[in-house]
């Protein structure tokens, strides 16, 4: 996405940031927008200050329209809302509790490593479409949303919105991230918080139209753009690793499924 300035010249989007700078900013901001806690954001800098501030697309727009005062910005820059534990759970997870991961009705529980690491949730032919990252007991998220042709539309990498069509809208209310396209149609619904990740709307297709369509409780596996089957299943307790994976063996005979996946949703074999 193109760097741009917000509301006034005293807040700008730095062109080049290192991975370390971004990590430092995520920690400073509580892994979310400083105003609303939204786990999808971009990094901005106040003039004369080194601290990077995570700001979601909704609050970027409010700043552009001068709907937020400079004093509110200053205050939240010092006290990001996700670090205000009275108002929001934020993304700090309890290492002694498992995190519930649901895609449609399918649920499993994950242990995330204390120090760091990642947990792929949706995997298609070697590409991770939805992933949790842990950093000092805090969560961040990466995901790719596609159109029906399997072209990537939205790309989020560890919370940072890197690609998105113009005019799309983001909101984060009641711990639920919603993304709407320019015609206000829902593209993603996901409850994202410190102990729960529930995806109930989203299209995750690779360029060959293999992947998953999530519609409420339904998880529809797609192979070559055709519906491969529906999956509505609760995993038994005791499965603490894994996610939802789709593997098209006709197209990718050499590909190896990652070992951590306990639940393989759909496989297309040569005999089919
Ligand atoms: Zn926000």
Image (cartoon, grey):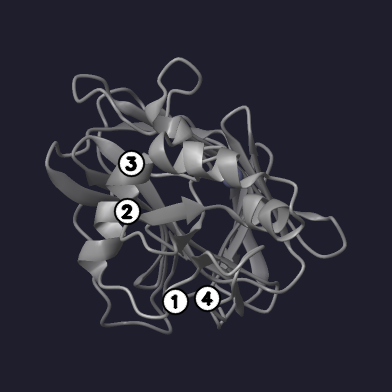
- Alpha-carbon span between mark 4 and mark 1: 22 Å
Residue 90 circle label: none
Crowding at mark 3 (Cα within 10 Å: few <14, some 14-19, many 20+): many
Q: Earlier in the sequence, mark 2 or mark 4?
A: 2
- Alpha-carbon span between mark 3 and mark 4: 25 Å
- Alpha-carbon span between mark 1 and mark 2: 50 Å
- Alpha-carbon span between mark 2 and mark 4: 31 Å
Residue 194 visible to the viewer: no
Residue 94 visible to the viewer: yes
Q: In the rendering, at what x and y percent does residue 226 appear?
A: 67, 70
Does 134 sit left or right of 163 as displayed? left
Residue 271 circle label: 1
- Alpha-carbon span between mark 3 and mark 2: 14 Å
Which residue bears the numbered disc 2? 25
Ligand 1 shows up in which quadrant of the image? Answer: top right
Residue 139 circle label: 3
Question: Disc 3, ligand 1: is the CB inside 8 Å?
Answer: no
Identify the secondary structure beneath mark 4. Answer: loop
Q: Earlier in the sequence, mark 4 or mark 1?
A: 4
Q: In the rendering, at what x and y percent does residue 82 appear?
A: 43, 32
Q: Earlier in the sequence, mark 1 or mark 2?
A: 2
Residue at (71, 51) in percent of width and height: 62
Question: Disc 2, ligand 1: is the CB inside 8 Å?
Answer: no
Residue 163 vs residue 205, the one in the foreground: 163
Which residue bears the numbered disc 4? 206
Residue at (69, 74) in percent of width and height: 165
Q: Quadrant of the N terminus?
A: bottom right
- Alpha-carbon span between mark 3 and mark 1: 41 Å
Q: Are marks 3 and 2 in contact (CB under 8 Å)?
A: no
Q: Earlier in the sequence, mark 3 or mark 4?
A: 3
């Amino acid at each position: 996405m193109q760097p741009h300035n917000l509301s006034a010249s005293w807040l700008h989007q730095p062109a080049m940031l290192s991975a370390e700078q971004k990590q430092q900013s995520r920690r400073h901001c509580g892994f979310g927008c400083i105003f609303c806690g939204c786990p999808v954001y971009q990094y901005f800098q106040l003039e004369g200050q080194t601290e990077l501030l995570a700001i979601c697309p909704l609050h970027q727009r409010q700043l552009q329209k001068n709907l937020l005062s400079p004093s509110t910005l200053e205050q939240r820059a010092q006290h990001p809302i996700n670090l205000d534990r009275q108002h929001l759970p934020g993304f700090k997870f309890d290492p002694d509790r498992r995190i519930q991961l649901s895609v449609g009705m399918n649920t499993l529980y994950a242990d995330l490593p204390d120090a760091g690491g990642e947990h792929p949730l949706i995997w298609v032919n070697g590409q991770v479409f939805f992933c949790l990252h842990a950093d000092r007991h805090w969560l961040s998220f990466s995901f790719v949303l596609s159109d029906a042709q399997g072209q990537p539309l939205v790309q989020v990498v560890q919370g940072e919105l890197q690609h998105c069509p113009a005019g799309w809208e983001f909101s984060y209310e009641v711990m639920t991230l919603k993304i709407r396209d320019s015609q206000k149609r829902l593209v993603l619904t996901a409850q994202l918080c410190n102990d729960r990740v529930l995806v109930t709307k989203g299209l995750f297709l690779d360029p060959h139209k293999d992947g998953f369509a999530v519609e409420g409780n339904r998880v529809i596996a797609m192979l070559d753009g055709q519906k491969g089957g529906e999956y509505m299943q609760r995993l038994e307790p005791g499965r603490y690793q894994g996610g939802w994976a789709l593997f098209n063996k006709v197209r990718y005979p050499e590909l190896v499924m990652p070992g951590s996946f306990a639940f393989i949703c759909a496989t297309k074999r040569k005999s089919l």
